[in-house]
Image: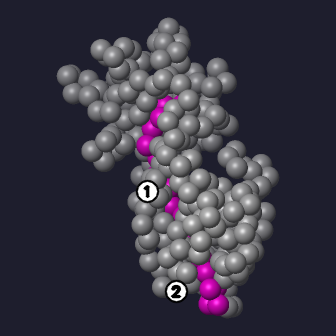
Amino acid sequence: MRRSDLRWLSEASAQANGAPRRARDRLLLGASGRTHEVGSIEPEVASRLAGAGVPIARHDVDWIIVPPFDASLELIARWLHDEGLASRWRDELLPVVARDGRTLAAVERSVVRVLGLATFAVHLSGRAEDGAFWVQQRAFDKATDPARWDTLMGGQMAAGESVRSTLARETAEEAGLRLDQLRLLRRSADVFVRRPVDEGFMNERIAVFRARLAPNITPINRDGEVVRFECVRTEDLRARLAAGDFTLEATLILGAEIGRRG
């Protein structure tokens, strides 16, 4: 394949490694002299939070949230939501993870980008026996990328979940499939997306899996978050990726899969 034919993949890779649109300060959790970096925040937003009496304060050049972390983060999330600074409230808790990988707390999903928190997702690239790709169209009312096309399955890891349990749950909810129905299930290289978004900054690590679906198995959505599934030949998928029909994450994942498989 000519290098010019992969311009769309190069552009997606560049977009997945973007700088914040506005300056951001480090966001810490801490107490008793011990602090842990967990994210980043725009100084103006942090100042407004502190001025409103929410449990966040200046810590040298950074901002710090003090314990109890879960309760403090809930107050911060409620204030951000009430002020219209968060995305749609989800009633879903995501883990708050320090740079060393330790989970320190949990927070409402709709504020993770405002706080620049690291998030973790799982995607599944599914192929038919003839090599065609199973893909999904996202629901028209999705909070992010409505109606765009995506991998067979993609979802965020909730607080208390592992990568494997997220894979099993999301595969069942989005595609109506059990893991034991997937052939040659393997983990591929992780994908990282760090880029500015409308609510703030996205810092996400995506665990990518690939598998084969038997001819007698058809994905069926169970949670109302998918409009439909299609099984697409490689050459048609490449054209649709180049046309920008897919989410950024799916473009990176499926682009790598096409390159890996040929």
In front: 191, or 256?
256
Left or right relative to 170: residue 142: right
Residue corresponding to mark 2: 183
> x, y (%) of residue 67?
34, 26
Tell me the quarter of the picture where residue 39 sits.
Answer: top left
- Label 2 sits on a secondary structure element that is strand
Query: Who comes first in sequence, dot 1 or dot 2?
Result: 1
Question: Taken as a whole, is the magenta stretch helix, strand or loop?
Answer: strand
Left or right relative to 103: residue 18: right
Q: Which residues are magenta?
A: 114-131
Give the amino acid type for the residue marked by disc 1 in the picture: Glu
Q: Is residue 166 visible?
A: no
Q: Residue at x 62, y 86 (%)?
A: 131
Q: Is residue 153 above or below residue 31?
A: below
Q: Residue at x 57, y 47 (%)?
A: 15
Q: Is residue 117 magenta?
A: yes
Q: Is residue 244 visible?
A: yes
Residue placed farthest to the top in the image? 51
In front: 227, or 69?
227
> x, y (%) of residue 241?
68, 64
Give the amino acid type for the residue marked by disc 2 in the picture: Arg
> x, y (%) of residue 121?
50, 56
- Residue 161 badge: 1
Quarter of the picture holding the C terminus: bottom right
- Label 1 sits on a secondary structure element that is loop
In front: 181, or 28?
28
